[in-house]
């Protein structure tokens, strides 16, 4: 039995007091479990029923491909569809008669000759887990591992049949035919039990079968469960810290956007104040240039121009807001409503400013061209 761990994984020394209590309880309960007695198998664990069906179907398809391959050879390599199944069989032979493609991860990576034994090992594992009160998770098509759960932790394991690579040079290298690689089964099985941060590997040894090591494996499982629980706690803490950092960054970004909006609004106020100043100076110039006997029309027009300047000028409104905000008598909603009503009035003023009487007023006035 070989332990597989990573440098960053949790260790028993880092467990919290509650996790140590859980570990002690699981270890104590393990001592009361009777030794597992294998029964005559008429069926497998209920959580493995679907997996059993998939394995049986794959084995039957491979046997059909073998029969089609033999029939095609007897018929002199007929062009019938059976030839394709024959190619499937030749490919399976090159891959050691694996039931599933070797480049894909499967809960059981087994061959045509070893899948029944592997299924029995999985049945023993699930049966022993159920005896101890662990939850055996039902295997569903597409699952890459078998799983058992307890105490909020989860362990995964895969059963693999060992293959050996060989080279077939039956035709001889002198013919120029390249070597072909084949895989053959060694008959040895292994269990890879994994958790977040580590795991255990159990293999057939010299004179020691995998089945005889299952009791020793379950002696280690309480520790693996609690270490996985501690690693999950550590990972959750890191995720919460990352989430908090993200929230803080979003808040900083919100404040930056708010400050940028305030500055942009300030720039708009300054521009409006500048335009109001130019309009008033323009009215003064007109008033100086117009003689007193021009009549009532000049007075009416100048009054209108100064009203336009008052509407454009944001100074009085800003002073009003600051004065009432300081004493706490004006709510933010009231200020926004006032802004909305002022915007409406300003739109009306701007509409009148589009008339020919206002064309003399420039849209932009450089400050340095006007004396204060």
Image (cartoon, rainbow, N blue to C red):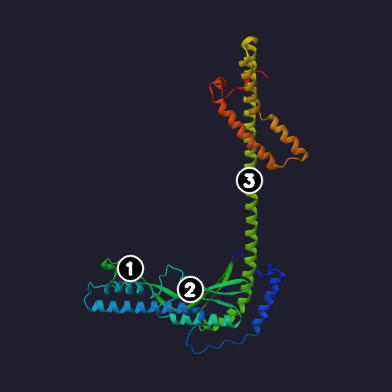
Whether pointer 2 and pointer 3 mark residues with C-beta atoms closer than 8 Å, the reply is no
- Spot occupied by residue 180 in the image (x, y as percentages of width and height): 33, 69
- Spot occupied by residue 352 in the image (x, y as percentages of width and height): 57, 26
**Is 353 or 16 nearer to us in this picture?**
353
> Which residue bears the numbered disc 3?
254
Residue name at image x 33 percent, y 68 percent: 179
- Spot occupied by residue 355 in the image (x, y as percentages of width and height): 54, 24
Q: Earlier in the sequence, mark 2 or mark 1?
A: 2
> Which residue bears the numbered disc 1?
179
> Which residue bears the numbered disc 2?
140
Q: Is residue 205 visible?
A: no
Residue name at image x 31 percent, y 66 percent: 178
Query: Badge 3, how many Cα within 10 Å: few under 14, some, many 20+?
Result: few
Which is in the foreground here, disc 2 or disc 3?
3
Residue name at image x 42 percent, y 70 percent: 102
**Is 130 or 292 nearer to us in this picture?**
292
Q: Specify the quadrant of the image occupied by residue 197.
A: bottom right
Q: In this rendering, is residue 201 above or below 297? A: below
**Distance of label 2 from label 3 (alpha carbons):** 46 Å
Q: Earlier in the sequence, mark 3 or mark 1?
A: 1
For mark 3, give the secondary structure: helix
């Amino acid at each position: 039995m070989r332990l597989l761990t990573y440098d960053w994984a949790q260790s028993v020394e880092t467990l919290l007091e509650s996790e140590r209590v859980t570990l002690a309880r699981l270890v104590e309960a393990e001592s009361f479990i009777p030794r597992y007695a294998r029964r005559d198998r008429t069926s497998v664990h209920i959580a493995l029923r679907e997996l059993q069906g998939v394995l049986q179907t794959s084995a039957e398809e491979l046997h059909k491909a073998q029969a089609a391959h033999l029939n095609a050879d007897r018929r002199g390599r007929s062009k019938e569809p059976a030839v394709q199944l024959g190619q499937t069989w030749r490919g399976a032979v090159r891959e050691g008669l694996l039931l599933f493609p070797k480049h894909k991860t499967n809960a059981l990576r087994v061959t045509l000759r070893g899948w029944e034994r592997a299924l029995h090992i999985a049945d023993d594992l699930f049966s022993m887990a159920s005896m101890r009160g662990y939850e055996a998770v039902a295997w569903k098509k597409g699952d890459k591992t078998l799983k058992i759960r307890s105490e909020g932790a989860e362990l995964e394991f895969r059963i693999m049949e060992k293959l050996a690579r060989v080279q077939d040079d039956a035709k001889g290298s002198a013919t120029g035919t390249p070597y072909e690689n084949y895989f053959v089964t060694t008959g040895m099985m292994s269990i890879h039990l994994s958790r977040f941060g580590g795991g255990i590997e159990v293999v057939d040894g010299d004179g020691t079968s995998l089945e005889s090591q299952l009791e020793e494996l379950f002696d280690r499982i309480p520790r693996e469960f609690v270490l996985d629980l501690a690693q999950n706690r550590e990972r959750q803490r890191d995720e919460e810290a990352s989430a908090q950092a993200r929230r803080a960054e979003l808040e900083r970004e919100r404040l930056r956007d708010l400050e940028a909006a305030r500055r942009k609004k300030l720039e708009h106020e300054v521009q409006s104040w500048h335009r109001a100043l130019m309009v008033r100076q323009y009215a003064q110039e007109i008033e100086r240039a117009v003689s007193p006997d021009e009549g009532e029309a000049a007075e009416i027009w100048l009054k209108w121009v100064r009203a336009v300047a008052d509407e454009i000028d944001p100074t009085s409104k800003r002073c009003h807001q600051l004065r009432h905000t300081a004493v706490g008598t004006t709510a933010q909603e009231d200020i926004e409503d006032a802004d909305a009503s002022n915007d409406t009035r300003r739109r009306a003023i701007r509409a009148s400013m589009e008339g020919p009487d206002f064309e003399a007023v420039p849209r932009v006035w450089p400050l340095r061209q006007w004396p204060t």
